Image (cartoon, rainbow, N blue to C red):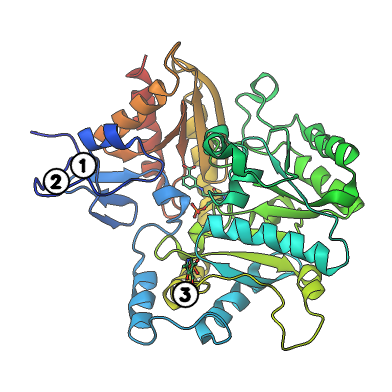
Amino acid sequence: MSRPAGMLDDDALDLDALWLPFTHNRLYKKAPRLVERAEGMYYTTPDGRRLLDGLSGLWCCNAGHRHPRIVEAVKAQLDELDYAVAFQVHHPQAFRLAGALAARAPGDLNHVFFAGSGSEACDTALKIALAYHKARGEGGRFRLIGRELGYHGVGFGGIAVGGMANNRKAFAGAMLPGVDHLRHTRDLEHMAFSRGQPEWGAELAEDLERLVALHDASTIAAVIVEPMQGSAGVIVPPVGYLERLREICTRHGILLIFDEVITGFGRLGHWFAAERFGVQPDIVTFAKGVTSGVVPLGGVIVSAAVHEAFMHGPEHLVELFHGYTYSGHPLACAAGLAALEVYEHENLFAAARRLEVSLERAVHALRDEPNVIDVRNLGLAAAIELAPRPGAPSMRGLEVFQHCFERGVMVRYTGDTIALGPACVASLGEIEAMVEAVRDGIRAAP
Ligand code: PXG
Ligand code: PLP
């Protein structure tokens, strides 16, 4: 074969103008990797090679790629309505999808605000939290608490409460005032190689009491956490941890926001992680899997009480000065409605819960491979953490990723952690193929 899998085979394609997100652009353009088509669990590269998708796109194509029912719904929507004015006028599909989401969200999470992505969803949730307290006469609650290693997208709000240093350091002067962070829950000494939720670590939630003591509860608006941290490499909450966060927030009148951009729509075998963990947040953010990645869509679901706080004052006045041109875009709503139907009719979350057992077994069998220092998993998410090569952090991760790509499997790497996030439609054989590619990759990256 003349060139590696996925290499550009159109010599006329000029790579210069495009600045890729979260990518080492110069190295990438020396050996670009592209995909041109996708179906189900597979991509096809421009030179016709099939690639098994080990990450559901970027944790979003939970029903597999180009599910025919979703594709049909989007095509049909295009024949009816392309765009509807989002402010003051709207369209039926958005109301239908909001109703469908409210019906599936746990407890009294029953009002939906649409955005275009997870980042917009996070900034929206933070703004709602601040405005909620203001509306109730508690405008002194201006602090937002995030968590170390947290990822809440790349808006100014999201990076301020986020805890990934690389996403913050160039923008240090532009962080929101009054933000603080809980300590993260990754502790290899106590929890390495846990299967599912670690037994140790519920007490780490007490760190919130430290921040309350420091800042006083009367200054804190909300705590935002990913119920399971995705981007930082599948950091699974210890048994009892989220319950304790909930208790502390309730005791001090602090809103609890679950950022479910990755954990929603089947990733943990349920509509939402809140349901799986049995912990009720006041606000949930979602994106990605809501349309199975077919059209961008994000949003926020709030509790009855949060919504109610805004519904006072003269009726002709806007209650929340916030919104996007593309809030509830018709194509996104059509894709969302179809995706929900697919998840339900094909019992994909039950399938995810069955596959979780196989994924867990397969990834933990990597434990004795060279340089593996941790294996973590929950639902259809797993991470294999490798020791960094001395003097060259991230190189091992990159080499494993490249090796898997050459072998026809797409995985994700962040630093020296390899992540897998198969779609709910994966077969047992496909899960095993992903894990075996990672095994080979680890052996090829001494
Ligand atoms: N919150 C969470 C919890 C996320 O995981 C966002 C917000 C932002 O969503 P948008 O749609 O603005 O990207 C995310 C996105 C990875 C990876 O490799 C994770 C995300 C995006 C891309 C890659 O883990 N998460
Ligand atoms: N910038 C300008 C100049 C705009 O007019 C708008 C929207 O009208 C925006 C940014 C925000 O765009 P969006 O609503 O798509 O977030």
In the rendered view, tell whether residue 38 sits above or below residue 297.
above
Helix or strand or loop: what does disc 3 sit on? loop
Callout 1 touching callout 3 (CB < 8 Å): no
* Residue extending farthest top: 390
Mark 3 closeness class: few <14, some 14–19, many ≥20 residues within 10 Å: many
Residue at x 67%, y 47% (from the top left corner): 176
In the rendered view, tell whether residue 206 sits above or below residue 305.
above
Callout 2 touching callout 1 (CB < 8 Å): yes
For residue 374, say whether it is visible: yes
Query: Which residue, given by chain and number where applicable, does mark 3 sit on?
Result: 329
Residue at x 80%, y 75% (from the top left corner): 308
Residue 162 locus on image (x, y percent):
62, 42
Which quadrant does the N terminus fall into? top left
Query: Which residue, given by chain and number where applicable, does mark 2 sit on?
Result: 47
Residue 382 locus on image (x, y percent):
52, 37
In the rendered view, tell whether residue 178 sits above or below residue 292.
above
* Camera-side mark, 1 or 3: 3
Q: In this view of the protein, which residue sits in the foreground, 243 or 193?
A: 243
Residue at x 69%, y 73% (from the top left corner): 320
Q: In this view of the protein, which residue sits in the foreground, 369 or 170?
A: 170
Query: Which residue, given by chain and number where applicable, does mark 1 sit on?
Result: 6
Callout 2 touching callout 3 (CB < 8 Å): no
Residue at x 32%, y 46% (from the top left corner): 19
